[in-house]
Image (cartoon, rainbow, N blue to C red):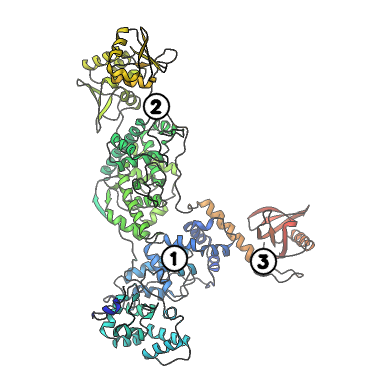
Amino acid sequence: MGIGELDREAHVPEGTDDGADGGAAKSVGAPPRTLNAPPRTLAEALRAGGDEGLAALLRARPDLLTPVPNDLTQLATRAGTRGSVVRALERLDAFALQTAEALAVAPDPASYGVLLSLFTGDDGHPDAPEIAAALPRAVAVLREQALVWGDDERLRLVRTARELLAPSPQHPSPTGLGPTVAEATAGMSPGRLQEIVAAAGLPPTHDPVSAVAALTALFTDRTRMAALLDTAPPEALAVLDRLVWGPPYGEVTADPTPPVRWLRDRGLLLPASTRTVVLPREAALHLRGGRAHRTPEPTAPVVVAARDYRPQVVDNAAAGQAYTALSTVEELLKSWNQGGPPVLRAGGLAVRDLKRTATVLDVPEQVAAFWLELAYGAGLLASDGEADERYAPTPAYDDWLDLPAAERWVRLAGAWLAATRVPGVVGTQDTKGRTLAALGPGLDRGPAAEVRRRVLGLLATLPPGAAADRESVLARLRWDRPLRGGGDQAADLRARIATWTLEEAELLGVTGRGALASPARALLNLPLAEPADDDALDSHAHDCEPAVAASRAATLLAPLLPEAVDHVLLQADLTAVAPGPLRRPLAEALSVLADVESKGGATVYRFTPTSVRRALDAGRSASDLHDFLTSHSRTPVPQPLSYLIDDVARKHGHLRIGAASGYVRCDDDALLGEILADRRSASLGLRRLAPTVLAAQADPSSLLEGLRAMGFAPAAESAEGDVLVTRADAYRTPPRTAPAPVQDGPPAPDGTLLTAAVRAIRAGDRAATVPRKEPSTSAPLTPGALPRTSAAETLATVQAAAMTGSAVWIGYVNAEGAASQRVIAPVRVEGGFVTGYDHTADEVRTYPLHRITGVAELADDEG
């Protein structure tokens, strides 16, 4: 609100809005389960919980595991650090976050009833039943993630989370509330406080503390506050209406108007600076009817179906697109078999090369970038690492080609699911103004894999065959992750990644007609027939190993893919029609002999002099080509095609080219004379060395291209005079690994790690908290301090424990100088070492006596 706007608004009477929606009775749900003994600290709350709760915390916040905490006190301390709390808040859903925001503006501690009233208000809320039903789950989530602790009568938000979510001028609260009366009046003179107390109709007090308490009590007393506002001018109420739902700050002139002055005199507007006033939190809550949020979001938006199809129709459509995806990737990498475009100095593919690739694939440039990144992410494409660096297929591409079609698709889909490189940002600029190139650096986006899986998981919540409405999917994603580092920019990135995911899933055959296909459900470890809710998504996330899931997906997809055929139909117009996908040997041979003219359900190949010469260059003879066509055609070989092969073969290899810089040799000296007389050969620098030999300044490859452009059909030869055979798959990069995804935070721990971590933390906590006796000759032990005893006393104590079979508490310093506390049960003491069962490590260990700082007996003599 600009300077003087409060004053101008004061002259426009408007109806007040106290924020309470009538018509619904206040509904209070059953509060969450209370703990038997109220904990005094977060560490005590964690200690009172079971191992399942501790494992749930570590699973939800895996950053707490690096490294594994020594005990629960260290775990609680780490859980309260700013970085960890920010990361945890960013992963809360909308209502859990609103619950944390409400606790941040509530008294500390707050009861469950107070928290519920901050959502439902004094006069109820239309969504009160939904709020009462959803609040226990939200509190449980906050407890599970150690953001809230305490029983239901004393709920406490961890201090760091309160600092992050509480209102401040620098970081306004999403609730729209401002500071409390006590915070807003900090530093105000006692005289000014007494003036406000008097203007509000309160008796004078003896000190500022009691004055603030009296003013706070007035603003939180619904009856007295209503009576005070009844005396306010209508213009003053209009000013409050502008501030009540936030932002609570407004600028005023040096000489405010009477309505603003009336509010300021009574403390309903308190000075935040020389020209800024703020509406105190207690007053705003009264005007809102006690509600912290204007629009609570207790329930997640429902993902709705835009259209319904039969599941078989969806699977068939997805399978057809999956086959197209395989063909596209093969065509792309086949076009780069002899070495692809060069790598830019800064990395990536030049814009002109991306355009050429899009032309070859007959797709838009953005789609071409997707196919390039898909092949790169699957490890099928990489740079060769040479001095003049170029892109080319990798050896893994040849292995991939040997797999069945369904398994090849699973490899591509699996790489896409895990990838964090985002093709959608190709062509945009980074923070330094540089254009991002396909296959280049800067395309990784940490949330990509998580958003991609979440989008597909939401599609899985619909019945099989149902295509989701895109806007409902985006709305659900916003509810799932409303707060992200980077604010609106990060939220926009997640929305764009979700949109690209839906488009890419259709291109890849993960979805068919917008609905999730059965092979994709299997690949995601989701149920194949039943719609999955959120709990199902989690419970099926690890129901089988990735290899098993991939095998299930391939098994489901294989029957849906078109069956490969071993024949073509030759036609008199020098074309061949493939009535379906060709078997690999036939497809590879035909792609050398003919050019693809059109694609679709049936691929059309065209025979040309250039394509026939290409087959002859690959080492095939004319008779080989006739036999090949005869054996693989269901129709007779047309006469024009036979004539074409014979004519090109008759000329092929009549000229021979080798390295001198280059030379041309031919038994027909008249033909060489014809070449010399042709003006187009001037650039080749030809001269006759012998009746059958021409020398050239051009290299052999340039000679080949030049003479072919003149209409001749030369063949290259080796130094021994043999014809050189060129093959399409001659060039490969050295072995390359696929790019590793960039993790968006620490990876989720597996069950084995969680079990070991929980056991280690519990054992370390037991060692730190188990009751023990203080050594008689030592000073009393301070909490957390290592025991200190003399070497003789240490030796005597551990020997006695070994004889009696009792456990002792020791302080130990390892070779790296790290100190720790341990509970051990000695079984043998000899040679300067003590061997015993270490309860902290849950195993038998041996410790040098000179590294034990001291020893103490356990008070209860527990082992």
Question: How far apart, in angstroms, are the residues tagged by discs 3 and 2?
Answer: 70 Å
The image position of residue 812, as x and y in percent, is 69, 59
For the point 34% across and 34% down, the residue is 332
Q: The residue under label 1 is which amino acid type?
A: Ala
Quarter that holds the C terminus:
bottom right
Mark 3 in CB contact with mark 1 (< 8 angstroms): no
Instruction: Kindly state the secondary structure of the residue where label 3 is placed.
Output: loop
The image position of residue 63, as x and y in percent, is 50, 57
Residue 50 position (above or below residue 418):
below
Question: How far apart, in angstroms, are the residues tagged by discs 3 and 1?
Answer: 35 Å
Report which residue position mark 3 lands on: 785
Circle 3 or circle 1, nearest the eye: 3
The image position of residue 8, as x and y in percent, is 26, 78
Q: Is residue 516 visible?
A: no
Report which residue position mark 2 lands on: 729
Mark 1 in CB contact with mark 2 (< 8 angstroms): no
Closer-to-camera residue (218/34): 218
Upstream in the sequence, badge 1 or badge 2?
A: 1
Closer-to-camera residue (70/174): 174
Report which residue position mark 1 lands on: 140
Upstream in the sequence, badge 3 or badge 1?
A: 1
Residue 333 quadrant: top left
Question: How far apart, in angstroms, are the residues tagged by discs 1 and 2?
Answer: 59 Å
Closer-to-camera residue (39/395): 395
Mark 3 in CB contact with mark 2 (< 8 angstroms): no
Residue 562 position (above or below residue 512):
above
Q: Residue furthest bottom?
A: 203
Circle 3 or circle 2, nearest the eye: 2
